[in-house]
Amino acid sequence: MQAIYVTALRNTHALEKQAAQMIQRQIERYETYPDLTQALRLHKSETDQQVTRLADLLHGHGEDRSLLKDVVTQTVGNVAALVHSVTGDEVLKNLYTDYSVETYEIAAYTSLIALAEEAGHTRDIEILRLSLKEEERMAEAVFAQIVPVTKGFVAREARGEKADR
């Protein structure tokens, strides 16, 4: 049980590192979507804290993060941001990706909480629940941006303005 739990902690740590990279690339590029950018900035700070909390949990179990997983997932995050940046609807594609990543992270933290319960690591559960709540809040925030960002994108396109970011 311990090995399964530690592997899940490592995987989630790598996932959060990837998410941080993706969020940072979006923050750097968005020019005309201030509400979305504000939500991303807040969640970038939360994500950085989640990375630290997960690393602390790993250390508390005598383990370390997986450097290989960190490198691979961060590279994937940067590649995804790059691919979306060359499309005419970058902000929309990133919005879809952001929502799917948030729901993935919700599933990961829900699973981690169940694993912590099964492994008897009750002290970890409160920390994991905090991250779960942050992910749920961000999923709601991203979902709330889908319609306004889509409509804003269409309006800017119709006026011949730069709409992709």
Image: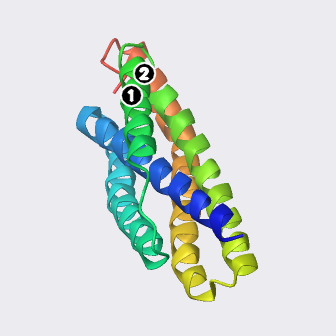
Query: Looking at the rendering, in which quadrant would you find the C terminus?
Result: top left
Q: Nearer the viewer, residue 11 or 19?
A: 11
Residue at 40%, 66% (x, y): give it: 55
On the image, the x and y values in percent for residue 138 come to 51, 57
Q: Amino acid at mark 2?
A: His
SS state under label 2: helix
On the image, the x and y values in percent for residue 89 come to 45, 19
Q: Give the residue at mark 1.
A: 81
Quarter-of-image position of residue 153: top left
On the image, the x and y values in percent for residue 27 come to 29, 41
Residue at 52%, 31% (x, y): give it: 150
Q: Mark 1 and mark 2 in contact? Answer it, CB < 8 Å.
A: yes
Q: Is residue 108 above or below residue 67?
A: below
Q: Nearer the viewer, residue 164 or 49?
A: 49
Q: Give the residue at mark 2.
A: 84
Q: Is residue 33 above or below residue 83?
A: below
Quarter-of-image position of residue 90: top left
Answer few, some or many: residues within 10 Å of disc 1's Cα (few below 14, many 20 plus, some between 14 and 19): many
Query: Looking at the rendering, in which quadrant would you find the N terminus?
Result: bottom right
Q: Amino acid at mark 1?
A: Ala
Find residue 90 and name its label: none
Q: Is residue 151 visible?
A: no
SS state under label 1: helix
Q: Nearer the viewer, residue 61 or 105?
A: 61
Q: Is residue 68 visible?
A: yes
Residue at 31%, 54% (x, y): give it: 41
Query: Taking 58 as reference, is 30 left or right?
Result: left
Q: Nearer the viewer, residue 33 or 159?
A: 33
